[in-house]
Amino acid sequence: MIEFITGDLFQLIWNGLFVGSFYALVALGYSMVYGIIKLLNFAHGDIYMLGSFIAFVLLGSVIGFLGTASLPILLLVLLITMILTGGIGVLIERVAYRPLRNSPRLAVLITAVGVSFTLEYGVRQIFGPAPEVFPFRLSGESVEVLGGRVSVPQIVLMVIAALLMWVLQLYVMRSKEGRAMRAIALDPRATLLMGVNVNRVISRTFFIGSALAGAAGVMAGAYYGSIDFLMGFTIGLKAFTAAVIGGIGNLYGAMLGGLVLGLLESFGTFVLGGEWRDVFTFACLILFLSIRPTGILGARIAERM
Amino acid sequence: MSALVLADVDLYYHRVQALDRLSIDVQENEIVALLGNNGAGKTSTLSMISGLVRPNAGSVTWRGQDLAKLQPWDIVAAGLLHIPEGRRIFSTMTVHENLLIGGYLVKDQKLIRQRADEAYALMPRLAERRSQQGGTLSGGEQQMLALGRALVGGPKLLLLDEPSMGLAPLVVKQVMQIIEHVRRNGTTVLLVEQNARAALRIADRAYVIEGGSVAMSGTADELAADPRVIEAYLGA
């Protein structure tokens, strides 16, 4: 028991928090979009995939040019990729979702699934079905923290994720535009009467959510080293699960849900074995949906953002 | 010169006609009341002025500008602020945040703070509840918050939809006093009310709307003395 606490326990917590911070980044976009237009954007996971592929191309050309890459270059690529995936998110909303703004929700949901397939098989057409090797791997020593081993890349990525979420939190809770975003989540019609250009705020929300998903995609590529056109599918569903666990539509809920899901997975696979990972995750989703559909924060903080 | 003019306006929701050749006008710095029963078209009139719905025929102009061509946010930018029925406070935001979002289109941060302070001075109850969530306020306080929120936007024309709804008589009186104060400071007011008695007490002129068009109009005093108005709307 003592050995478990000193050794495995902290290792499991570290692993869970690491994976969870990816889930949280993707879950944020899911949750924010749901919060303001009540759409489950099933194409969101594919934005993560696009982020990986855009960074794959960018890094590939940089390395072709300079012969090498480094962490600062990765950060620059991360930034450019975020802007590009953010733009793609805005475009998708404009083309696929906005014309259906007043249609039944099911119609938009089906459209989202269509967008998802379009992105997946579009990328497959360009890059082929085989996984690509990400041109740059973050590598570094491991350090011992509280009995668990954490690698330097893991720490770097977690710090980036935490920074992005901190900035987002400031933006949504403190800025004028963030306030408008929360207002739309509460009452779109009343927000219109405040002089808020609702279309612009919705576009901005898609931009931010897609930029965060793109960032997670770049980070996943640099960490796992292999990317493929379907990689967004599972993480999309897991981000959805994380958003539900935290309380969908709720900003802090998405962050918390991501970390909680990462931890649940980490401990679940420790007990059940790695091959049970996805079974366990989606069993958690079903459990939450049936027992506590409002999520952990759903009841305490009001339903939406 | 008329500030707001609605001329022969028709409005349909799908096949249902809400407004039928409605014509009203509001002069600068007037309080004009729109009276009438449920479904007469009062709320539709306000929604159309603020750009939430579009007229099917006729014209809506504010100081000579055609409002029917503008987006709702452009209409707010022109100084027309609409306080909707049921106040529509942002329930999980604090009182102060509710006030701040009223100044969404105001660029000057100092001006927003100054107007919020003026709203607090005018309605001290709000100042006491500054960091409380809007949804926890009483109906009267929410109405005051809705008024304060609009005032931070610096309205030239205030469109008020049933501000007295669900309030105790004493609170209705307070709300009406605030509206009079706002007008004294130079704002024009178009007031939709079912509480005709309270509305006629502060209005200069009024229209009675029935079936989407004007049934009667005149100064507030004339209408308050009109036997038809007394029978149908003042419950005498």
Image (cartoon, rainbow, N blue to C red):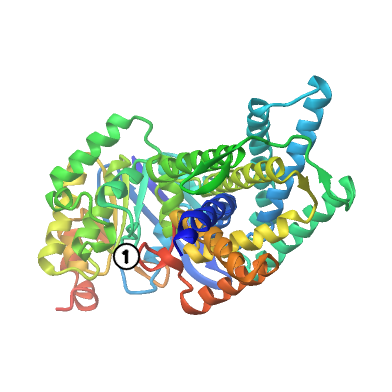
The total of numbered circles placed on residues is 1
Label 1 crowding class (10 Å Cα cut-off): few <14, some 14-19, many 20+? Answer: some
Q: Does residue A130 appear left or right of residue A20 in this picture?
A: right
Subunit bearing disc 1: B
Residue A239 location, quadrant? bottom right
Between residue B181 and residue A250, name the one nearer to us: A250
Q: Secondary structure at mark 1?
A: loop
Measuring from the top left, give residue B179's x and y in whole percent.
20, 51
Measuring from the top left, give residue A277's x and y in whole percent.
65, 66
Check disc 1 and report the residue beneath it: B86
Between residue A140 and residue A196, name the one nearer to us: A140
Q: Is residue A159 above or below residue A294?
A: above
Camera sees residue B7? no
Q: Residue at x 58, y 54 (%)?
A: A23
**Quarter placement of the C terminus of chain A:** bottom left
Residue B169 location, quadrant? bottom left
Q: Is residue B38 above or below residue B24?
A: below
Q: Does residue A29 appear left or right of residue B22 in this picture?
A: right
Q: Residue at x 77, y 42 (%)?
A: A53
Measuring from the top left, give residue A282's x and y in whole percent.
62, 71
Measuring from the top left, give residue B205's x and y in whole percent.
24, 55
Camera sees residue A186? yes
Q: Residue at x 25, y 35 (%)?
A: B113
Q: Amino acid at mark 1?
A: Gly
Q: Residue at x 68, y 43 (%)?
A: A223
In the image as oriented, which residue stretches furthest toward the left? B170
Q: Is residue A71 above or below residue A115?
A: above
Q: Is residue A248 above or below residue A184?
A: below
Between residue B88 and residue B131, name the one nearer to us: B131
Q: Does residue B158 appear left or right of residue B45 in this picture?
A: left
